[in-house]
Amino acid sequence: MAAFDPLTRRRLLGMAGLTLASLTLPRLVFAGDAHASHNTPEEPAGTGEFIRLDAPRKLKLAVNLNAVCLAPVVIAHGQGFFTQHNLDVELVNFGNSTEVLLEAIATGKADAGVGMALRWLKALEQGFDVKLTAGTHGGCLRLLSAASGGVSKLEDLKGKAIGVTDMASPDRNFFSILLKKHGVDPVRDVEWRLYPADLLGTALERGEVQAVSGSDPFMYRLIKSGVARELSTNLVEEYANLSCCVVGVTGKLVREDKRVVAALTQAILEAHDYSVQHPEAVAKGFQAFALNTSTEEVQAILHDHTHGHHAVGAALTEEITTYVTDLKTVEVISKGTDPVEFAKEITADVFS
């Protein structure tokens, strides 16, 4: 598969569509914004009519404020998307592992969270009582090669080294799947090397690795600086219209108050739709919490993602089945796990 221009294919796809130490975030208000009162033309596909709870409900939502792709969720907090549904949402910033975040949701220390499916699935296989209610968007993962190097397609990585920040990262999982589909065994034909995120570019320039994988803004910056070129993303082939980030809710809340979960999920998806229509407003609002980013950078990254694509109900279960099936081929998910049954077990259709 040949390399492609990241600012065409990705943008077109995008437009088509802890520790438990917490940080309580202030509410943001942007004067004159069209969404000051609920003004979404229609609710996200598959979520039915607009849901407003009869009584106010307090919830804790776990997020990672360093993730640019979660900027719409932060804006949902400040722009009134939650309050329109009669939800009083406290955003809790998690800076620790996925396992800690999932444990917090499963034990009720947080009611819900947003994260990457390919990071959550292995942990969910261990039995956490967390249900996935929606896929929020796609496009968070990039695989890069040196701008001046000889690696121009996935097949070129056979016998080569790839730099990553975590051996259990979603990008390593996804590009392992993609390499396998292109005839490169990600376990035996490739060496994965660990680096801090800010040293991946240096490792690539020095030739210590022939490719690096990760998420934005680090990957976006390496392309922008001219150090690297985009070799592939998680918006290629059959994955072009799949979600990479998902909403996870404590199983107890799903079983006991599905309407509350539906309202929360709907509000989150509305915010992602809003980010497609108003990326500049979202990027500006995100600056109150983002680390070392600019409005221009966040806006460009949001354009590269598919924030207009959401999966709920049967569509979400199908997407998760695809991921679980593929993760088995690269020895991440256990051989004995049934992808269809597992996907049904960990997803919840809260809109039916």
Image (cartoon, rainbow, N blue to C red):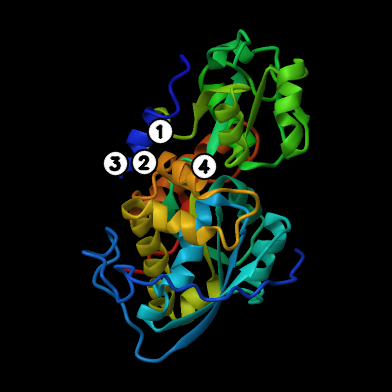
Q: Secondary structure at mark 2?
A: helix
Q: Residues within 10 Å of mark 4 (few under 14, many from 20)?
A: many
Report which residue position mark 1 lands on.
Answer: 10
Q: Which mark is residue 208?
A: none
Q: Residue at x 53, y 43 (%)?
A: 324
Q: Is residue 312 visible?
A: no
Q: Is residue 131 visible?
A: yes
CA gap between label 2 and label 3 equals 5 Å
Quadrant location of the C terminus in the rendered image: bottom left
- Seen in the picture, residue 307 relative to 225 is either above or below; the reply is below
Q: Give how far across and how far down residue 133 sits, in percent.
A: 44, 62
Q: Give how far across and how far down residue 193 sits, in percent.
A: 77, 28
- Seen in the picture, residue 317 relative to 225 is either above or below; the reply is below
Q: Earlier in the sequence, mark 4 or mark 3?
A: 3
Q: Which mark is residue 14?
A: 2
Labels 1 & 2 near each other (Cβ < 8 A)? yes
Labels 2 & 3 near each other (Cβ < 8 A)? yes
Report which residue position mark 4 lands on.
Answer: 140
